[in-house]
Image (cartoon, helix red, strand yellow):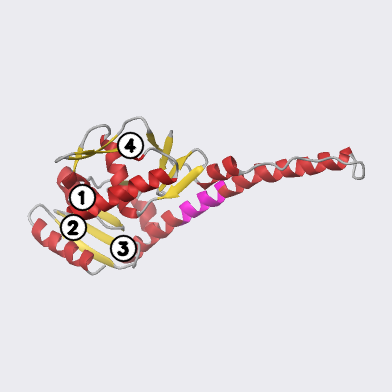
Amino acid sequence: MIYFDVVARKLYHHNKSTRLGFREALVLECLLRHAPKTVCKQTLICYAWGNEYIGQTSLAKSISALRRSLMTISADPTLVVTVPKQGYRMVAGMVETKTVGESLTTVEQTKVAPVKTNAVTGLSAAESRHDADNKAVSSKPIRQCVMMALMLLACVASSVFVVGKINGWFWSDLVQRGELTQKRVGSLYVFYPQKTRLDFPMEQFLSHSQCDCLVYVENRHKLTKMIFVSRKTKRSVSIRYSPFNIKHATSKIEQFLAEE
């Protein structure tokens, strides 16, 4: 079984692992969501590149890179099947989406050195070294799991803090409003209050505005306020969205993405 870590963008197979590129990971995620059905090229391009205009050559290069990554971990590259004149599909049941984590690889690859006894040191010294090795092996993945959990918590907290500073929040306001809800829309990480509802047209707008961004969404009267924050450049843009000004909102996000 091949494991795909969506967060770390890594493929695991036996004792081998490889990291995928940003676009290749999104292409694989889209194929797995529809497996074993065929996904047309336009759907894959929309999912991985959003409203960015590219040719089909870029998709073909990403598929080739994905197959090379499968060969790197000694997996069958034909798991990604080309359907002529239609698109691509993934063989079902061979790749499982799962957050594997670095600690799992460490446990699989760590080997306890054999303890040797000799007449000089004696048996008691060998046993003590063996116990020390076992404690070191058992404690190392636990420390790594704790570190990963702390890093993830810090990342979420900093993301909410950045969006909050842009929108003029105070922490007391967040407590009064209640917890934020998080949802993944393609490559976007969307945060919104519990009283805000993401309807189908709004999700469709977000799915065509793909970038490596955090998005805060909040309903205000008849308008919906969206704040896009680039995770790479830390730039931001505020957009007022409604079903009557989709063209204006689309042009504003396209200008923001063009300047990235």
Residue 224 among those drawn in magenta: no
- Residue at image position (31%, 66%) is 166
- The residue located at (45%, 42%) in the rendering is 12
Is residue 147 magenta-colored? Answer: yes
Q: Which residues are magenta?
A: 145-154
Earlier along the polypeptide chain: callout 4 or callout 1? 1
Q: Return the residue at label 1.
A: 45
User: Neighbour class for label 3 at 10 Å: few (<14), some, many (≥20)?
Assistant: some
Helix, strand or loop at disc 2?
loop
Say which amino acid is labelled 1: Ile
Residue found at x 61% / y 48% = 143
Front tag of 2 and 3: 2
Quarter of the figure with the C terminus: bottom left
Secondary structure of the residue carrying numbered label 3: strand
- Give the mark toward the camera: 4 or 2: 4
Dot 4, crowdedness within 10 Å: few (<14), some or many (≥20)?
Answer: some
Q: CA distance from mark 3 to mark 4?
A: 34 Å
4 or 1: mark nearer the eye: 4
